[in-house]
Image (spheres, helix red, strand yellow):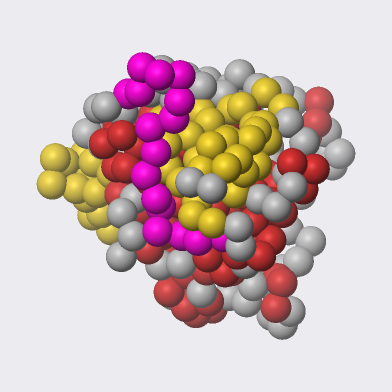
Amino acid sequence: MRETSGSVFDYLAKDISALGTFHSRKSGVVAAYGDVLHAVDTEGRPTVLVPIGEPKDGPQAWRSKSLVLQTVNLDVDDGKMPFVVLRCIASNLNHQFGLLVDDLLDAIEVEPDRAANVVSVALDRWRNLFEGDGGGVLSPAQLAGLLGELTFLGELVKVHGPAAITSWKGPQGSRHDFVFAGCSVEIKATTNHNNMTVTIHGGRQLDHPDNGDLYIRAFQLEPSPNGVSVPEKVEELIAQGVSRSELLMALRGVKYNYADSLAYESSRFVLLTQRSYLVDDAFPKISSENLVPRGMIDRLGNISYSIDLGQLEPIEHDARNVQLASLGGS
C-alpha cells in the first residue's frame, strides 16, 4: 500500500533545500514521461511534480489564495523536462492537499499516458474545496445532526454501493436531506437522552415531496468520549468506496470544512436509539398543506417548532426500502 502523500510531505519538510530547488522523492507512480514526484519547495510548501511531454501540454497556469499551478522546465538526469507543478500555499490546507495528491496519483496510475489531462480533471473536482470560505466551527448540536446524516448515508452505501451519495441532497439546498425514486427522508438528531424531541425548521420542511412519501429517520445520540466522531465517520465512508472529493464537496455544503477535522475529533457520540416515522396526514406538523387558509405559508417567517417523536408510533423503514433515483424504480 502506497504511503499517504500527507505523510511524505511531512517527511520532506524536515529537510528543506536552501539552494532554491525542490526537495523531492519519487511517489511510486510513473507517468508516460517519468516518475511523478512528491516535493516541498524552499518554504516547505507541499508540491506535486508531474512530468509531461511538452510545456504546451500542461494545464493553463493559475494562482489562487490556496493553490498555485504552473508548467516549468526542471533539471532531470539527462537534461531538462517540463513538469506540471501544483503546490499548496495555504498551510492550514496542507492535509487536504495531501488528499488531493492521493486522488491525483490514483488517477495517473490508471491513465499514465494522459497525466496532464488527469491533473486538470482532478483539479476540477477539488478546486472548490480549496477556494470556499471556511466559515465558523460547527457546534456540538450541528455535529450530532451531521453524524445522523452520515450514519444514514453509511447504511445506504452498504446496500446500494458508493453511488448512494447521489441521494444526499441536503447539502445542495434541497428541502429534504435524502431524495429517492419513490420517497424522501429527512434526518433528525437529538442529544437529549430523556426523550426524542426534535426541531423542525421552517413551514415547508415537512411538506410532502413530489416523488411520493416523506419519512423521518431520528437518531438519539449521547455525547461520550467512547463514541464516534464525524471525522471518523467520514473516513469510514471513504473506506466503503465513496468518492473522497464528492463527499468533501457535500460536507462543504453543510459548512463542514475538512481542514477543521482535528477540532472535531473530541466531539463524539454514542447512538442510543434510532427510529423511522412516516409523515402522513396523522403526523403532527405545520406545512403548506395543512395551514389555513392555504397558500399563506410563505407569509409567515421564522417558523420553528419541536415534536416529541417518542409519543408517536415508529415504523420499519431502512436503506433496503429505497431505490436510488439514478437507478429508476420505486
Q: Residue furthest front?
A: 78
Is 181 situated above or below 205?
below
Residue 295 percent coordinates (x, y): 86, 39
Q: Residue furthest bottom?
A: 329
Instruction: Specify whether residue 192 is painted magenta.
Output: no
Residue 26 part of the magenta-drawn span: yes
Q: Quadrant of the N terminus?
A: bottom left
Which residue corresponds to the image point at 14% horizontal and 40% vertical from the top-left?
225
- Counting every numbered tag in the picture gives 0
Kindly identify the residue that appears in the image at 60 percent across and 40 percent down. 80
Q: Which residues are magenta?
A: 16-31
| Residue 267 location (% of width, % of height) | 26, 35
Q: Is residue 157 visible?
A: yes
Residue that lies at the very extreme toward the right in this rendered image:
295
Please provide percent x and percent y for residue 277. Answer: 49, 62
Name the residue: 42% across, 63% down: 154
Locate residue 204, reporting x and y percent: 70, 42
Is residue 208 placed above or below 213 in the rendered structure?
above
Image point (73%, 31%), residue name: 61
Of 256 and 144, the residue lying toward us:
256
Vertical side of 97 occupied by 312: above or below: below
Say which of 139 and 192 sits in front: 139
Apparent side of residue 125 relative to residue 49 in the rendered image (left or right): right
Which image quadrant: the C terminus? bottom right
**Foreground residue among 177 and 17:** 17
Check the image and name the residue furthest to the left: 226
Report whether residue 245 is seen: no
